[in-house]
Image (cartoon, grey):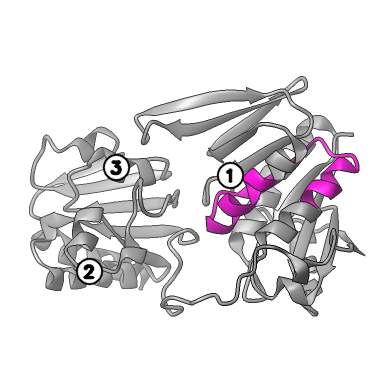
Amino acid sequence: MSNILAFAETRGGELRRAGLEAVAAARVIADAKGGQVHAVLFGTAGISKHAAALGAHGADVVFVVEHAGFTHNNPEAVSATLADKVKGGYAGVVLAASATGKDVAPRVAAKLGVPMASDVTSLTVSGNGITCTHPGYTGKVIQTVTLTANPAVVSVRPGAFLPKENAKAGAVETLAPSGDPSASRVKVTETAAGNTAKLDLGEAPVIISGGRGLKEAANFKLVEDLAAAFGNAAVGATRAVTDDGWRPHSDQIGQTGRLVSPDLYVACGISGAIQHLAGMRTSKTIVAINKDKDAPIFKIADYGIVGDVLTILPVLTEAVKKAKA
């Protein structure tokens, strides 16, 4: 079989962009193999309302698994159902390398007894192999691995595969969970939401990120102003900044923070420590602002501005406002 299964991730009953990105990556593999993309959507009663969106973004068939045991993410029950479905005849399964995906993907691979490629930023299909690239050694190298196992398990970095709309509606079928999700050994009793008014870093097309070059917490207002001018931008930060309490740890981007791949990443007063680069170097376009012309961030930046970030940010903000007016 050449069909590929995609995990349609949800949170709080809402379909996440990560689920559509998993479908987009699965589409790449399925098209090369001449197969279909089948998505699996987990949730409580009513979750099937998102099936149409999955079909409109490339899923040929959407399997809906409704059960009260999926009120919160239930990695054990989800991975058991996914693995059993894959055993029914699929060439692979694709998940997002999100927090949820990182919990589920290794469980699926272990249940299937196959290797997996994690945090993949691009992939191609050649013969029976799926060749994946992903950052390794804290982003210092880009590794290429080829999975020849059948089925293969792949998790893709958020932002690396863009959802694509099409005019085709996918078929919708119900799927029974494997076992009783309520009897799972893993019980998620509560999901504590962060600042829901903020755009999620993993889903933002533009990220404006600040570092110690801003000199003090109050100057992050300049970063927020630029993000607001774009209208679709999220604010990120380096670990040094979050450790100092200038920004919440949920804003941290890097090896021990969020891994992001936005269309545009603006690094404001960030020198470019390896740990930070590991989290953002796969951004599609990188703009760096730093008064030190030898700062490491300029080695990976597509555009560089050498100067005082406190002077440059207000100018950029006004320029963006003017361009969008």
Q: Amino acid at mark 3?
A: Gln
Q: Position of residue 310 (x, y in %)?
A: 10, 62
Residue depicted at x 38% and y 31%: 137
Q: Which quarter of the rendered picture does the C terminus lie within? A: bottom left
Q: Is residue 25 left or right of residue 312?
A: right
Q: State which quadrant residue 194 falls in.
A: bottom left
Check residue 46 for magenta coloring: no
Disc sitting over residue 275 in the figure: 3
Quadrant of res 297: top left
From the image, state whether disc 1 or disc 2 is nearer to you: 1
Q: Who is closer to the viewer here, 238 or 231? A: 238
Q: Is residue 79 above or below residue 195?
A: above
- Assign a secondary structure to mark 2: helix
| Label 2 – label 3 distance at C-alpha | 31 Å
Q: Nearer the viewer, residue 248 or 305?
A: 248
Q: Is residue 56 among what the camera can see?
A: no
Q: Amino acid at mark 2?
A: Glu
List x then y, in percent, for residue 304: 21, 42
Give the residue number, with chain letter if any, for mark 2.
318
Which residue in the protein does label 1 denote?
Answer: 156
Residue 281, image x, y percentages:
37, 41
**In magenta segment, residue 97:** yes
Q: Nearer the viewer, mark 1 or mark 3?
A: 3
- Say which element carries label 1: strand
Is 204 left or right of 281, judged from the image as shown? right
Residue at coordinates 46% horizontally, 61% vertically from top-left?
Answer: 204
Contact, mark 1 vs mark 3 (Cβ under 8 Å): no
State the CA–CA distance, disc 1 to disc 3.
Answer: 20 Å
| Image: magenta residue range | 82-107
| Residue 253 numbered tag | none
